[in-house]
Amino acid sequence: MTQHLLPPMIDLPASPEAFRDAVWEDVLPYYEALAAAPLDPPDTTVEPWLATWSRLDTLVGEAGTLAMIAYTGNTADTAAEQAYLRFSMEISPRLEEQQVRLARRLLDLGWSRPDLETTLRRFRTDIEIFREANVARFAQIEELSAGYQKISGGLSVDWDGEAKTIPQLQPYLKAAERAVRERAFRLGAQAYLAKRDELADIFDRMYALRVAVAREAGFADYQQYCFATKHRFDYTPSDTARFHEAVQQTVTPAVERLMAHRRQALGLDVLRPWDVSVDLGTSTPLKPFADVGTFVNRAQSIFTRVDPELGGQFGLMATEQLLDLESRPGKAPGGYCTDLAFRGRPFIFMNAVGVPDDVNTLVHEAGHCFHDFATHALPFTWQRRTGHEAAELASMSMELLAMPYLVQPDGYYAPEEARVAWLEHLEDVLGALVHIASVDAFQAWIYTDPAGADRDARDAKWLALRDQFERGVDWNGLEPERLARWYRQLHIFELPFYYIEYGIAQLGALQVFRNAVHDAGSAVAAYKRFLALGGTRPLPELYAAAGAKLIFDAEAMAELVAFTEERIEALRAGAEAPFRGVIPV
């Protein structure tokens, strides 16, 4: 079965399966046909042409996504690795060239319509920065990224004679016995430190390629190039520098206060890094679920309490087996939501081990899923895509909107356990802002200072920045372990400069949360209106639709920090829910 949106010469396959084993020579003729198809007069041919281009992109894109899912699910599978590399190294970089080619053809027509203005602006930028010489460099970077995934996905440690993945150490970091926590912390860090030279070799090569990409495209440095390629039209590198400074002024002191409270609650003279994850207010670590079935079923109940439509969407994902949740040997670390663009379904990947952070991760990724479901109704694939700032607003807002419903019988926790989980999450929100700012400042330094090319200078800068941003924890004698943190931050390796978005979005999500504290129903309705806009509006308008604004300054940031600390204090005092007047039953 084929689609006949244009003359028969541009018949498209019925599903992404047609491209599963494709090489570039199998894909190219479809784009060649689009490039040659008649577009005159534009008022009758452009939209069918765009629909065909959009459908082709989703077909090829989903085939590549399925290859990525298979590889990250088992990095030891040689066949899956080869398929992933074929898409990431041979097909994806060349797709960009075709995208620019077709975008240039569209823009030359002078055609537009209101709901595609943001898309056309992105197209103009892509055309301006594209250089054919960079295609091969992108392919090399993708190969290095796969190498990083293979190393990190293959890491394991010996725990009493049993091999444990790094994610599988997380429950031990919450153990009541301090010696157990310290052992888990040191083993996890040492696993990365043992690979430090290999990882530094990979990053050295990535760095050189990225610098060359930026120069080829006419940019003074790679940071400026990334702002363009990520379509950051609404803020600048100087705004992110202001963000870093504002975090130091407002969030770092708040986190230091949290750490002081933690130290006192644990009865410690000094707080060490293996003390920051153990739950306060309970002698037994929280275990929200014992099996994946319970994990999924309760998540669906929680989302249904937030909004019945969202609960139904998550249930559909469970039914269609679009969830890969548990940790296992060989599985790539971390978690993600990706979009199966052709069928209009999202997919969640993560490494669950039965700790509260797994709940946060699943709820976060589900926020991305709800965004994907909402935008699939838009006619063209480019309208469904948002910048990461909007994508992360969807996920981080969902983390906070779901908080009241984590309590049983629908959720994971007994009432007192839920209060402990709520406290941990709000404290983590503030701690994450400190981490986000330091990671973004680190990357800004790497790619704007010539010393960023030197691996030892990078390590020294990381330690200096962590001292600057992160206070209240004693790292004395643990400098190597502190270094391990940046080597395990896959964004720095694979997705450079994709991190400040988390901070921008976290501040937006806190505004959504503040709205929900006063009127949860209205906040959820605004959230859904924001989701449905996809990428059809500029970033400030998307945030406004959700009931938020972009924040880079210390004054506005301080207000949100104070609000968060207020909710933390209320929960410490025994508040029954994180939303005033919203008591889960």
Image (cartoon, rainbow, N blue to C red):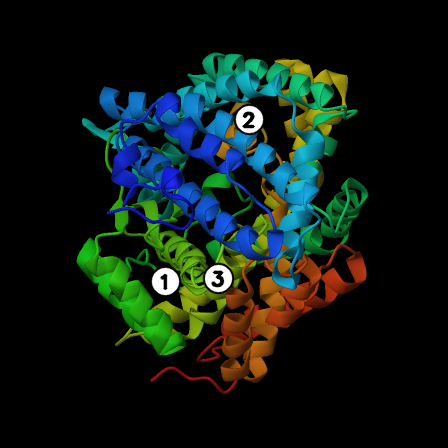
* Disc 1 target residue: 282
Q: Is disc 2 surrounded by few (<14), some (14 to 19) or many (20+) residues within 10 Å?
A: many
Q: Quadrant of the C terminus?
A: bottom left
Cβ–Cβ under 8 Å for marks 3 and 1: no
Among the 4 quarters of the image, the one containing residue 137 = top right
Residue 359 image position (x, y, % from top left) = 36, 57
Decide which of 455, 96 is in the foreground and name it: 96
> Closer to the camera: disc 2 or disc 1?
2
Q: CA distance from mark 3 to mark 2?
A: 44 Å
Q: Amino acid at mark 3?
A: Leu
Task: Please report the residue visible at 52 percent of the width from the left and 34 percent of the height from the top.
Answer: 36
* Disc 3 target residue: 378
Residue 493 image position (x, y, % from top left) = 53, 27
> Closer to the camera: disc 3 or disc 2?
3
Cβ–Cβ under 8 Å for marks 3 and 2: no
* Disc 2 target residue: 483
Residue 483 image position (x, y, % from top left) = 55, 26
Q: CA distance from mark 2 to mark 1?
A: 31 Å
- Closer to the chain start, of discs 2 and 1, is 1
Q: Amino acid at mark 2?
A: Leu
Task: Please report the residue visible at 41 percent of the width from the left and 23 percent of the height from the top.
Answer: 146
Q: Is residue 52 above or below residue 165?
A: below
Decide which of 572, 469 is in the foreground and name it: 469
Can you see residue 427?
A: yes
Q: Secondary structure at mark 2?
A: helix
- Closer to the chain start, of discs 3 and 2, is 3
